[in-house]
Amino acid sequence: MARMDRRDFLGFGAVAGAAMLAPRWMSAQAPGATDRLGQMRAAGATTAIKTTRLYDNLYLLQGAGGNMAVQTGPDGTLVIDSSFSTAVPHIREAIAALTQEPASTLINTHWHVDHTDGNEAMHEAGFMIYAHRKTRDRLAAPSTVKLLGISLPAAPTGALPVVTFDDRMQVWHNGDSLDLVHFEPAHTDTDIYIQFHNADVLHAGDTFFNRMYPFIDEGTGGSIGGMIQATAKALSLAGPQTKIIPGHGPLGDRAELQQFHDMLSSVRDKVAALKRAGANEQEAIARKPTSDLDAQWGKGMMNGDAFTGLVYRTL
């Protein structure tokens, strides 16, 4: 088989079951404070990892950063995403409770820090990192996530993916066939999905935020239209029994992904109509186009006003 390979960003708190709690680093952030990255890493150090079995040898891991997956077996341990650097000891403990097989492969769903900050430590533990080519490009250069006020230096060499691809890659690992496929720019321009065919599990990365408004990184190619296209693509891959791992939020299924897709489409259409009618961003926000959705979707890191602004700017 081909073998695969970092950094620190969003950081949603661990989601236990269907709980919709805001990330701990976010709730702890004092007004005017600027060390968001420090808050994220502090949450990574103190948040326990929750493990959920999805298939015979495939597990969901949830902690302070983005949702991870672990596949075990004789080909070695495969992991999707690496959370925060401070969470890696907890991640390795969770993996050790599942298997004693050696480290093999780490796949990054995209470049953001809450999915890649642990890359270097995981690489030092023996994992080879796979990702889309643009994930390596973005990690290798300084970057800024303006909405969160985070500036990141270039990642160290050990944190960079060493196997990259442009469109798609197929991998056979521990008795399953995996498709790694690039989405068109959606949450970022680096997003991929990972489909486990035998296990019937789809990891959608941050193109799917289950039961909450998503963050869209407009600074690295994200847009509301791209998110809608990505969810439509994921829906075309998912069957009635498919388990769908979102980047953030509880484990989902096809029905929940459909609800997410429909919410995105509804907000896009409402905001686009306001923009066509001449409303500027602040005027569009003041019209509260998400008011009928906020009770269901506004309990994550993005409230309705913030999400409306993102949609407006990325139409």
Image (cartoon, grey):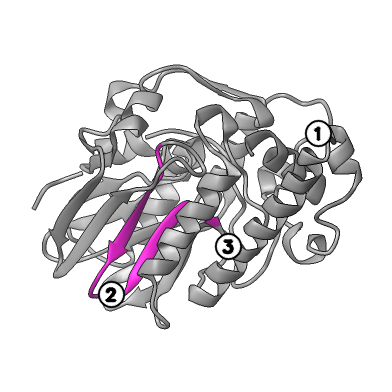
Asked if residue 28 lies left or right of residue 249, the reply is right
Q: Is residue 191 magenta?
A: yes
In the picture, measured across the screen, residue 153 lies left or right of residue 133, that is: right
Q: Which residues are magenta?
A: 190-208
Is residue 222 positioned above or below 244 on the image?
above
> Are the residues tagged 1 and 2 within 8 Å (C-beta)?
no
Q: Is residue 283 depicted above or below 79 in this figure?
A: above
Confirm whether the magenta stretch covers residue 227. no
The residue that mark 3 highlights is: 261
Residue 27 visible in the picture: no
Quadrant that contains the C terminus:
top right
Q: Are marks 2 and 3 in contact (CB under 8 Å)?
A: no
Question: In this view of the protein, which residue sits in the foreground, 167 or 76?
Answer: 167
In primary-sequence order, the first of circles 1 and 2 is 2
Number of residues whose C-alpha sits closer than 10 Å to that of mark 1, classed few (under 14), some (14–19) or many (20 or more): some
Instruction: Look at the numbered disc 2 and give the secondary structure of its residue.
Output: loop
Marks 2 and 3 sit apart, C-alpha to C-alpha, by 24 Å
Can you identify the residue that label 1 sits on?
Answer: 281
Q: CA distance from mark 1 to mark 2?
A: 44 Å
The mark found on residue 199 in the picture is 2
